Amino acid sequence: MATYGKIPEDVIEAVRRHHDIVDTVGKYVHLSKQGKYMKGLCPFHSEKTPSFTVTPELQIFHCYGCGKSGNVIRFVEELEGYSFPEAVRVLAEDAGIPVTWAGSDGSKPSAEDTERTVLIEAHELSAKLYHYLLNNTQHGKAAKDYLRERGLGDKLIDHYMIGYAPEQWDTLSRFLDNRKFDPALMEKGGLLSAKHDGSGYVDRFRSRIMFPIWDRDGKVTAFAGRIIGDGQPKYLNSPETMLFTKSRTLYNLHHARPAIRKRKQVVIFEGYMDVIRSWSAGVKNGVATMGTALTAEHCQMLGRQADEVLICYDGDDAGQAAAMKSIPMLEAAGMRVMVSMLPKGKDPDEYIAEYGPEAFMREAIDEPVSVTKFKLIYSRKNHILLKEEGRKNYLLEAAGIVAELDSAIEREIYLQELSREFEVPLEVLKQDCLIKHQELQKKKPQRDNNDNSWNNGRNENRRKSGPPAVLPAYVKSERRLLHVMMRDSEVAQTVHERLGDAFNIEDHAALAAYLYAFYAQGYDPDAGRFIATLQDERLERAAATILMMDGDFPFNEDILAADIQDIINVSLLREVHRKKEEMVQAERAGDHLLAAQMSIEIITLERQLTGR
C-alpha cells in the first residue's frame, strides 16, 4: 500500500472522498453554478470578477487569476496554512476517521511526534487544573475577585478557561508527576523549571492568573500568566517550544475564526485582556499578538482569513507607533487597513471598563479612520502647529502622505480639508502633492507581469488587452494528450508504449510518469485521486490546469497518432539543428569525411520528420 510520509494512501483517499469539494469550499467561498462548474471570488487573492472555479465532477479547484489549483486537501492546506499532514489530520478528525496512521506502515512515530502529543496532553490537563483551582479553591478566591472587579463574569472566565497558579512551588509538578509525565519533558515544554541545584523541578508559573494560549486547532500549547499585586515580571508567557512560537501565534484565533470568515474582517489588539474584554462587548473577530510585535507571518495568516483588518492598539504614543509599523506589513499581505482611534490614550480594556461596551463599539469599532487619516493625525503630533515653521513642515509632510493615494478623488478630499484648516490655497497643495505623487509612481516597481497578473481591480483591464499568447503546436498536443490520459487509462497505455516520458515540457513529462505509475498500481481513471498522489504543488497546479481545459475537442486514433508525432518531431528538429551545426564545424575544420557522415544522418532524421 502506498504511503505519503506516514499517511497511508487509502486514508488520504477516504479523507478526499468524505469531503466533497463543493461543500468544503462553500464554507469559505460563495459559489454559483455555471454549467458544469461552480464559480466564485478567489479566497487566495483580491479580485472583482470571479475567476475561481470548482469542478464537482473532478473534485478539483482552479483559479484562473492567481493559478492556485488542487483537490480538497490542497484547498484546506493553502487556506489554513497547514502542512499536508496537518491538513489530512484535520480533515480526518472532522470526518471521524481515526488518526492512527503514525505507525500503520510498521514504523514507530518519531520521537518528536511522541513528545508533541504528550506535551499537548499535559498542557490541556494543566489548563483544566488551573481553571479548577480558580473556581473551586480558597487559593483562587483573590484571583477570582480580581477578575470580577475587572469586569470578567463567570461565563467569560469559563469561555477562556482562565485559571490560577497558586504560590506553592510544586502544585503543577506534583499533579503531572502523579500522572507519570516526564518532568524533563515538561520543562522542555515550558510547564516546569529545573531547580538550580539540579535536585528536581518546580512550577514555572506561581501566584498568577493563567490564560491558556491555543493553537489554530484549539489545542492548548502555552500559557500567559499575570501576577496579582506587586511583583515582576507583571506578565509571563511560556517560553518558545516545539508547540509555541510567538511569531506564528495569534491569541484567540481559534475562537475568532468563524466570525473573521463571516465578516472577512479581523480586529488586532495588543494584549489578551483587550481581546477578552472586547469579546464581551461584542467583538467576536478579535485576535492579539503574544508579547511580540506583529510579524510578516502573522500578517500572512490573517491575509488568508480576511480582506480587511482593523488595528485597535492602545491609544498612547507607543500604541500608535506600533500601529504605524504594522500598517505596511498588513497592506503587503493584501488587506485593506483601518485604524481605531481610542481617545485619552486608553487601551481597549480600560476604555470598555470606563465608558461601557456600547461606547467602545460605537467609537472604536464602528467608526475607524483610514490609514491616510491616521498617518495625518500621527504626523501632527510631531509638529508644533502654533508656529509657522511647524505648520509648514506639517503641510509638506501631509502632502507626501496624501500623495501615496492612487485615487485622485481621495487626494482631492484630503487636500481640501488641509486647505480649509490651514487657509492655504488648494491649488498650491495640489501642485506640491502631484509632484510627490509622480515621484512615487516612478519609484514603484512594475506591478504584475502579463504571464502572472492577478484578476483584481488594479490590472483587470490589462488582462483583457492584447491577444492571448499563442502556444506552440507541440505544447497543445502534450496538454491534449495528458487531458485525455487522466480520463482514459487505455489512451495512457498507448502513449506509454509509443512515447514514454519523451514529453518536451518538464512538468508534462513528470505528470506522464506519475500517471503511468498510477495506472500500474491498478487504479481506475480518477483525476481527483491522481492529483492527491502528486504531493507537489507545481505539478498539482499543472494537472488541474490541464484538466480544466474544455474537453469537447475531437479525439480519435488519428489525432492521437498526430499528437504523438508532433511531440516526437520537436526532439527530431532539435537533433537536426544540432547535427547541422556539427556538419558546419566539420567543414570549417576540413574534416570532409565527418561532414559527409553528418549529412547522411541529417537526411535520415529529416525523413523521419516527413514520415518517408
Image (spheres, helix red, strand yellow):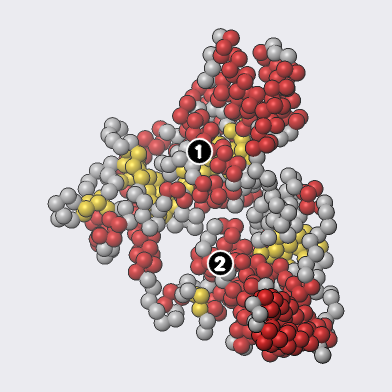
> Does the rendering let one see residue 442?
yes
Residue 206 badge:
none
Q: Which residue occupies the foreground of this view, 271 or 434?
A: 434
Q: Give residue 602's quadrant in the image.
A: bottom right
Residue 273 horizontal/vertical position (percent) = 45, 38
Residue 524 horizontal/vertical position (percent) = 67, 85
Q: Residue at x 72, y 71 (%)?
A: 546
Q: Which residue is mark 2?
A: 91
Residue 215 horizontal/vertical position (percent) = 46, 54
Q: Residue at x 68, y 84 (%)?
A: 592
In the rendered structure, the answer to whether residue 276 lies left or right of residue 187 reads: right
- Amino acid type, callout 1: Phe
In the rendered structure, the answer to whether residue 124 lies left or right of residue 64 reads: left
Rendered position, 334 above or below 145: below
Classify mark 1: helix, strand or loop: strand
Classify mark 2: helix, strand or loop: helix
Q: Give residue 206's quadrant in the image.
A: top left
State the separation of the CA atoms marked 2 and 1.
30 Å
Residue 269 badge:
1
Q: Which residue occupies the foreground of this view, 489 or 501?
A: 501
Q: Residue at x 34, y 54 (%)?
A: 126
- Amino acid type, callout 2: Leu
Residue 311 horizontal/vertical position (percent) = 56, 36
Query: Which quadrant is the C terminus positioned in?
Result: bottom right
Q: Which residue occupies the foreground of this view, 560 or 127?
A: 560
